[in-house]
Amino acid sequence: MTVPSKSLAVVSFSLAALLAGVLAPLEAQSREMVSVARPEINMRTGPGTGHDSVWLLSRGYPLQVLGRQGKWLQVKDFENDKGWVYRPLTDRTPHFVVKVKVANIRRSPSTKARIVGRAEYGDVLRTLAHKGDWAKIRDADGLVGWVARRLLWGW
């Protein structure tokens, strides 16, 4: 059977669009994340200590990896600030950062659950578990509870 070239182009385009729709969410889910493993590290303008420090990041602060050069990682944070960090000063311990003004910390993963605390914009929370659209977290004071994931950035 001979397929006219116009029909083949339409089928090819449709297949490409379908694959893009399937693969895009997978790419978003598979983004590489790291967290700061030391009390404080520098985020620099380039991969090396000869580059200026633009931010001082605290333990647990989550970062998305954009690229690599030797032992340096090009990263971005929840505010889309980009820079470079030294890979040995990071680890794979999951953390979130609060991306809204105030996030309620609840006893269980439900908006009907009792509020046991609050976290503010920029607070770093240790990720303990996930359940649907909720994250079980521990804050800097040791409070354990659940926060809606839409209020957080990280993993």
Image (cartoon, helix red, strand yellow):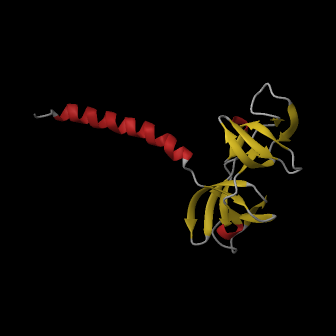
Apparent side of residue 70 relative to residue 106 in the rendered image (left or right): left
Q: Position of residue 103 (x, y in %)?
A: 80, 36
Q: Position of residue 26 (x, y in %)?
A: 50, 44
At horizontal 25% and vertical 36% (from top left) the residue drawn is: 9
Residue 58 vertical placement versus 104 (above, below) = below
Apparent side of residue 98 relative to residue 19 in the rendered image (left or right): right
Residue 40 vertical placement versus 133 (above, below) = below
Q: Position of residue 75 (x, y in %)?
A: 63, 58
- Tell me the quarter of the picture where residue 12 sits: top left
- Tell me the quarter of the picture where residue 63 sits: bottom right
Furthest residue in direction top, as rendered: 112
Say whether residue 45 is visible. no
Q: Position of residue 78 (x, y in %)?
A: 69, 47
At horizontal 86% and vertical 51% (from top left) the residue drawn is: 140
The residue nearer to you, when weighing 29 against 129, is: 129
Say whether residue 57 is visible. yes
Number of marks in the rendered image: 0
At horizontal 18% and vertical 35% (from top left) the residue drawn is: 5
Residue 69 vertical placement versus 29 (above, below) = below
- Tell me the quarter of the picture where residue 101 sits: top right
Locate the N terminus and report the quarter of the image it occupies: top left
The residue nearer to you, when weighing 94 against 75, is: 94
The residue nearer to you, when weighing 107 against 58, is: 107
